[in-house]
Image (cartoon, rainbow, N blue to C red):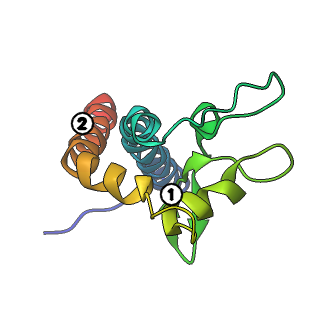
Amino acid sequence: MEFEVLNWDALLKQVEELGRNVNRAENAAIKAGAEVALPVMKQEVPRSNISAADYKHMVDDIQVSRVKNVDGVKMVEVGPSAGKGGTRWRAHFLINGTKFMPPNDFVLRTAQRTKGQIQIAMLQELQKKVMGWL
């Protein structure tokens, strides 16, 4: 069986476009999984009793980051924000505990509660994107 490709440039362009579409579908699937974990994590984080007007509660600061590529693995972070005004630095005390309070690992509990739901959401998003190509 032989075949001849008459327009290599068009074929290469279609292959490159398919690669970009796969990349977008992966990113959308990862974000869909993170969106499943977001409300569960907000339930798991305890709210402090502090009621000052300028106090930022960790539960109000839970966010989904953009998709990142870390050592060749795509990922998002779900949790308190870092940087100025963020509450991520306080999460360390909750997760590991202190000599005054026991550990309260809300991240691990969130992962355990949502593992199957995240996988389903990611699979559904991938199927939706792939079916859109056909």
Residue at point 46% right, 35% down? 42
Name the amino acid type tagged 1.
Leu
Pick the residue in front: 20 or 71.
71
| 10 Å crowding of disc 2: few (<14), some (14-19), many (20+) | some
Please tell me whether mark 2 or mark 1 is closer to you in this view: 2
- Residue sitting at 62 percent across and 31 percent down? 60
User: Could one spot residue 6 in this view of the protein?
Assistant: no
Residue 119 versus residue 13: which sits nearer the camera? 119
Q: Residue 62: x, y in percent?
A: 58, 39
Q: Is residue 127 above or below residue 113?
A: above
The one nearer the camera, 96 or 1, is 96
Q: Is residue 19 above or below residue 56?
A: below
Is the N terminus in the top left, top right, bottom left or bottom right quadrant? Answer: bottom left
Residue 35 horizontal/vertical position (percent): 43, 35
Percent coordinates x, y for residue 32 in the rendering = 40, 38
Nearer the N terminus, badge 2 or badge 1?
A: 1
Left or right, 57 with reference to 6 = right
The residue at the far top in this view is: 53
Report the amino acid beneath label 2.
Gln
**Measured along the vertical axis of the image, is residue 90 above or below residue 125?**
below
**77 relative position to 25: left or right:** right
Q: Residue at x 45, y 37 (%)?
A: 38
SS at mark 2 in the image: helix
Q: Distance between the Cα atoms at labels 2 and 1?
A: 29 Å
